[in-house]
């Protein structure tokens, strides 16, 4: 049985039949063709699949699509439409806070969620919040530089 | 903008291997060996085939009918006929409409396997270093022995001998993107898109495994979500192609993380003995002994033992040296390359030992390295002359950093120094095609950007330098192995060196060709005016559009092919007594400093500061180079402190996942100070040396030396987990 | 597999009772159960998701905090009073995962899964929490120590759900040791709380025995709000001696025993001196 599902993704209402135990990650990537959200460990240990649900960072690999309900979902593809998301994206680009780019969507989405929840957060708060997002290329150095810029008080 | 791919990557807009899809594509799953050693008695796939959604299931028995006639039997076929050599070895494969169905079906395979004795650890083969005549064993893949000078005599004359036994752990590359590919078979053409560091390497391996001529295999790289050596050979491609041939439909094959841990060829444990004969501040002699676990590697696939062992001896002036090692065959998965293959482990042993010598003799570890470190013109144990080498200048920089840190850091902080050296490679060859159109310059290559920036930034920077065009007018045009020029792969710190030289060669030829079309004597350069490429010579400007021949207009521009086939150095054959040893190409130094605090009650180590000084030859693009050093250091910190594959007595991996295989998080990696020494030129463009591998090499040694400095306790086993440090502190 | 997501408690209880016995899995944050489903360790017929139930209370009472079973840990952590009033719980929640995982995981899920390596159970044991269990006959409450029967085993009866947890606001501390400090499974963790009215110390440890447990002999050694160093040392030694200590791929028994003593001392001192926070 594949019950029907309504999702609000990046401001667009989507609907379709989705099996009850399908992960949000798979619905986004393979039914909605939103492959910016990356599949990593599928066990909540790498953060590559992070999306915002109701503005809060969530692991789409450990979320059933049917659990989301009416809550708006923001994926990396929708980040530019969000003022905080746009600032995070611009900073990551300016600092080249990425190398292979595979973990990057998870980082920019998680950081956007952290900044939305904690406006004016300190660098420590942001770094601490990112401990669930793994990067194997950058040594986190350029990411740290981006975080420093984003945590600076806005003039 | 620092990187031209940054905007698309930040928005998740690029297609990686895991993102590949095709209409009607099936999903493949490998059916893998549940035991580390056994003989296959029966493979029954009937229950797999009858599972819902399954389109095909194949094993060794199906190979002959799937492959062109008479070519089913290759030396090492995709699926083994009888002997299973390691746990997780693919025995069969299934393709189904969905991944879930394929997974479910794969679990229904009926396998009858006769168990065979399992050799899980090095000690199962050699309980200790094998004495004379004890090294003969069917569990040895390679035995290497080289000697320089009178080693016995050196030890007889020594006034002090320092000995150490070191152990290193298995590690995995663990790129965030697992291996993934999409295969289809069109008539005679076996086509696969893959997340690969080496399309031609994957083509060669696929051809050998399947017994299909190389020209009939076409490999096309996708964007690659990190490689670190793990994606340099053909791995999934043959299986995906076989499934596609059997199903007559495209097949997507992707490893789960658990599979990634078992199938991605990586570094396995080792045991290393080093002993040095000393007189005053001179090292009269050194013996290095290495037992390297090479897993279930096939004979002839050992590339490490005779290469890595030299890194244990170190870049030091030593009167007499003996190097001896065994590549030990166990029933772990086969050994493979991992960013500076096995060098961080060797250098951990060598540099721990160097500090132990210095401390035993009461010398400052930095000064001791200054006195004994190689300078250009010195000789390696194998008789090769050391080329331009920035070690001494890097040590000088390290001294300044150390003095500053001593003032800034609290008492009790441990400071550790380690020297890595590496032979960054330009010897593996490659070619590129430059295509100059009226509006842009395209660098055509088969290579994907794997993250380091060596392609998207490095090759573009070289093209800028040689042509004069701005980076905005230069683009990488990725192509496949059928159309593209040959290249060895994005590995071994060779991309900027070898392919960069090919770009330089092609650019020079391109300018020469244009110069033929514009009369005059002056130097010709290219620039962009109002979106058009323009050639400038003798002050006159001519658009590229007006220089094209009719046929170039039709085919899209002026073409120039560039090549680079480098030469390695040479070693003295008489010093090699047994086995294969290799010469180095560019001698590249990396000098690192770590500052750590150690919790003396728990053994927990925290890295407070880190500095890396790189012997770059010439830096082509500073931000990209710095990023490579930073990333290498972080990977090295994982190897130093937390990363370790754990194997039980049945050669089963106990921690195939990120929960218990601990790569560093953002909280474990401190800000990294990067300094660059230039002027000791290598063979890359303008004297550049490769930058990807050297920065990972000294890290475990630097951290171990810092822990010893902080506590007086020497940990001789990687990684330096809190428990190992606690034992060294004699807390337990 | 069928997914049910009731909006009312009665519907949820009814779903539990109506479903085939042992074949209904309750889904809260999903950080553990969904992995079991993937690995085939669990294959229920009905998945009962609690995400639509209004069970996300966070209410300070006079001397305790009521926490709804499905409140994500991140929201608990963000409570402005938590660090001051229950420092040990704040430290324990802060030791778990990254931001996304904390938005996913729930206190109720953590208790019901009764994982041997839970970082939350020891602090909740030391604080002597009460667990509210909702069944068809109404809600009953149980001390946490009686709720936990063993690894992955609880006193939940058929037709019951964890509804809420009451956490006494007490001076407390949480200390842990991991191979990788951030986002790792603890080799051991230790929680200590002090109940001023009864002048009682409470110590709980995890990662040592098959399930987190109290170290009552060690507790009995400590007296008054500021026990002397001698008593603290004796309590640490006692905790290390009394425990049955396991050995696995994360640590040997000898190292665990050593850590136990060290971290018990540190946690007691932290409470006694009113200093919170695992040193960076």
Image (spheres, coloured by chain):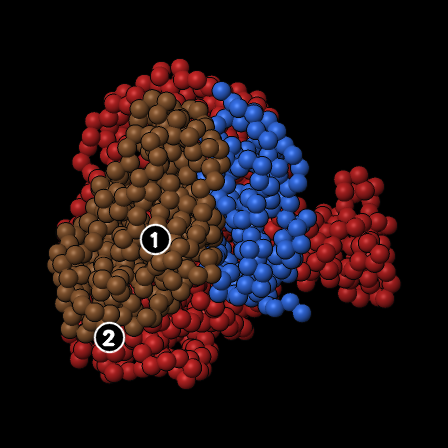
**Residue under numbered circle 1:** C167
* Nearer to us: label 1 or label 2: 1
Q: Is residue B257 above or below residue B310?
A: above
- Few, some or many residues within 10 Å of mark 2 (<14, 14–19, 20+): few
Q: Quadrant of residue A5?
A: top right
Chain coloured blue = A
The colour one sees for chain B in the rendered image is red
Query: Could you say whether the residue bearing mark 2 is in a helix, strand or loop?
Result: loop
Image location of residue B600, percent across then percent down: 25, 71
Is residue B440 shown left or right of residue B206?
Answer: right
Q: Residue at x 39, y 79 (%)?
A: B409
Towards the viewer: C41 or B567: C41
Instruction: Tell me the brown chain.
Output: C
At 16% across and 52% down in the image, what residue appears? C245
For residue B270, which quarter of the picture? bottom left
Apparent side of residue B622 relative to residue B722 in the rendered image (left or right): right
Q: Nearer the viewer, residue B116 or C106?
A: C106
Q: Quadrant of the C terminus of chain A?
A: bottom right
Task: Write down the residue under mark 2.
Answer: B712
- The chain ID associated with circle 1 is C
On screen, B146 above or below B266?
A: below
Image point 35% across, 45% down: which residue?
Answer: C110
* Above-or-below relation of B550 to B620: above
């Amino acid at each position: 049985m594949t019950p029907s599902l309504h999702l609000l993704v990046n401001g667009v209402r989507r609907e379709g039949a989705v099996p009850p135990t399908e992960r949000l990650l798979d619905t986004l990537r393979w039914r909605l063709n939103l492959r910016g959200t990356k599949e990593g460990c599928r066990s909540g240990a790498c953060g590559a699949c992070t999306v915002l649900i109701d503005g809060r960072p969530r692991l789409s690999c450990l979320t059933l699509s049917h659990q989301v309900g009416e809550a708006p979902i923001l994926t990396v593809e929708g980040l530019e439409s969000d003022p905080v998301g746009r600032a995070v994206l611009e900073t990551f680009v300016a600092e080249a806070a990425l190398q292979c780019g595979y973990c990057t969507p998870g980082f920019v989405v998680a950081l956007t969620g952290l900044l939305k929840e904690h406006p004016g957060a300190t660098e420590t708060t942001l770094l601490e919040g990112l401990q669930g997002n793994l990067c194997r290329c950058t040594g986190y150095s350029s990411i740290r530089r981006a975080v420093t810029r984003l945590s600076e008080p806005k003039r | 903008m620092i990187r031209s791919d940054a905007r698309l990557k930040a928005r998740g807009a690029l297609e990686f291997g895991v993102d590949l899809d095709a209409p009607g594509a099936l999903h493949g799953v490998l059916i893998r060996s549940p035991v580390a050693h056994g003989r296959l008695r029966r493979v029954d796939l009937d229950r797999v085939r009858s599972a819902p959604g399954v389109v095909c299931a194949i094993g060794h028995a199906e190979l002959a009918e799937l492959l062109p006639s008479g070519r089913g039997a290759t030396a090492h076929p995709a699926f083994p006929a009888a002997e299973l050599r390691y746990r997780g070895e693919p025995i069969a494969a299934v393709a189904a409409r969905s991944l879930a169905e394929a997974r479910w079906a794969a679990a229904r395979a009926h396998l009858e396997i006769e168990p065979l004795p399992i050799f899980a650890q090095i000690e199962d083969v050699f309980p200790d270093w094998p004495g004379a005549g004890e090294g003969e064993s069917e569990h040895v893949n390679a035995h290497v022995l080289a000697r320089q000078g009178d080693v016995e005599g050196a030890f007889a004359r020594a006034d002090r001998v320092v000995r150490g036994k070191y152990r290193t752990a298995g590690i995995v590359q663990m790129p965030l993107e697992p291996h993934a590919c999409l295969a289809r078979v069109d008539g005679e053409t076996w086509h696969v898109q893959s997340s690969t560091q080496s399309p031609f390497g994957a083509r060669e391996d696929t051809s050998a495994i399947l017994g299909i001529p190389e020209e009939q295999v076409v490999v096309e790289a996708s964007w690659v979500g990190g490689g670190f050596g793990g994606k340099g050979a053909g791995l999934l491609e043959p299986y995906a192609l076989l499934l596609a041939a059997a199903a007559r439909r495209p097949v997507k094959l992707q490893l789960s993380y658990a599979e990634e841990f078992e199938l991605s060829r990586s570094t396995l444990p080792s045991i290393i003995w080093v002993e040095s004969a000393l007189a005053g501040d001179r090292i009269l002699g050194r013996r290095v002994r290495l037992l390297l676990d090479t897993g279930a590697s096939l004979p002839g696939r050992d590339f490490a033992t005779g290469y890595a062992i030299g890194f244990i001896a170190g870049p030091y002036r030593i009167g007499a040296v003996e190097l001896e090692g065994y590549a030990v065959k166990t029933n772990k998965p086969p050994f493979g390359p991992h960013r500076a293959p096995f060098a961080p482990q060797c250098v951990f042993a060598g540099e721990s030992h160097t500090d132990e010598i210095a401390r035993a003799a009461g010398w400052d570890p930095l000064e001791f390295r200054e006195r004994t470190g190689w300078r250009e013109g010195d000789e390696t144990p194998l008789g090769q002359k050391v080329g331009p080498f920035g070690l001494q200048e890097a040590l000088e920089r390290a001294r300044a950093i150390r003095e500053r840190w001593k003032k800034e850091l609290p008492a009790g902080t441990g400071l550790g120094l380690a020297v890595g050296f590496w032979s960054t490679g330009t010897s593996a060859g490659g070619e590129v095609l430059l295509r100059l159109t009226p509006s842009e310059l395209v660098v055509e290559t088969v290579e994907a950007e794997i993250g380091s920036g060596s392609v998207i930034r490095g090759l573009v920077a070289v093209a800028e330098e040689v042509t004069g065009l701005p980076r905005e007018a230069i683009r990488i045009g990725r192509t496949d192995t059928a159309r593209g020029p040959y290249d060895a792969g994005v590995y071994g710190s060779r991309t900027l060196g070898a392919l960069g030289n090919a770009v330089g060669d092609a650019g020079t030829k391109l300018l020469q060709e244009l110069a033929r079309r514009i009369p005059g004597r002056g130097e010709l350069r290219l620039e962009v005016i109002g979106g058009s490429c323009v050639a400038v010579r003798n002050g006159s400007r001519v658009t590229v559009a007006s220089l094209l021949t009719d046929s170039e207009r039709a085919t899209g521009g002026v073409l120039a092919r560039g090549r680079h086939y480098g030469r390695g150095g040479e070693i003295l054959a008489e010093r090699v007594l047994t086995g294969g040893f290799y010469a180095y190409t560019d001698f590249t130094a990396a000098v690192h400093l770590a500052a750590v605090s150690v919790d003396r009650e728990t053994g927990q180590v925290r890295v407070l500061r880190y500095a890396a000084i790189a012997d770059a030859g010439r830096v082509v693009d500073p931000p990209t180079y710095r990023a490579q050093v930073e990333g290498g250091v972080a990977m090295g910190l994982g190897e130093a402190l937390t990363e370790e594959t754990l194997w039980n007595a049945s050669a089963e991996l106990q921690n195939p996942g990120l929960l218990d295989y601990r790569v560093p998080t953002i909280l474990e990696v401190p800000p990294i100070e990067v300094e660059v020494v230039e002027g000791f030129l290598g063979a890359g463009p303008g004297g550049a040396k490769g930058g990807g591998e050297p920065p990972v090499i000294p890290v475990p040694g630097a951290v171990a030396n810092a822990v010893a400095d902080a506590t007086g306790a020497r940990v001789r086993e990687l990684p330096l987990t809190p428990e190992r440090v606690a034992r060294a502190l004699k807390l337990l | 597999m069928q997914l049910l997501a009731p909006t009312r408690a009665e519907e949820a209880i009814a779903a539990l009772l109506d479903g085939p016995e042992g074949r209904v899995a309750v889904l809260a944050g999903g950080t553990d159960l969904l992995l079991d489903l993937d690995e085939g360790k669990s294959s229920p017929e009905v998945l009962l998701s609690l995400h639509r139930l209004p069970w996300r209370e966070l209410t300070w009472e006079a001397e305790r905090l009521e926490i709804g079973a499905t409140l994500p840990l991140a929201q608990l952590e963000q409570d402005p009073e938590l660090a001051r009033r229950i420092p040990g719980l704040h430290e324990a929640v802060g030791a778990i995962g990254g931001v996304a995982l904390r938005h996913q995981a729930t206190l109720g899920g953590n208790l019901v899964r009764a994982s041997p390596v839970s970082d939350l159970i020891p602090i909740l044991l030391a604080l002597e929490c009460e667990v509210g269990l909702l069944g068809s006959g109404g809600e009953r409450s149980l001390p946490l120590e009686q709720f936990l029967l063993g690894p992955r085993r609880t006193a939940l009866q058929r037709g019951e759900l964890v509804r809420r947890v009451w956490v006494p606001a007490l001076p407390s501390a949480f200390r842990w040791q991991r191979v990788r400090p951030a986002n790792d499974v603890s080799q051991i963790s230790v929680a200590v709380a002090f109940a001023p009215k009864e002048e009682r110390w409470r110590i709980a440890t995890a990662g040592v025995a098959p399930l987190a447990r109290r170290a009552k002999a060690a507790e009995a050694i400590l007296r008054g709000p500021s026990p002397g160093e001698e008593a603290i040392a004796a309590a640490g030694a006692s905790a290390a001696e009394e425990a049955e200590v396991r050995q696995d791929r994360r640590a040997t028994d000898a190292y665990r025993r050593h850590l136990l003593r060290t971290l018990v001392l540190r946690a007691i001192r932290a409470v006694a001196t009113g200093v919170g926070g695992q040193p960076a």
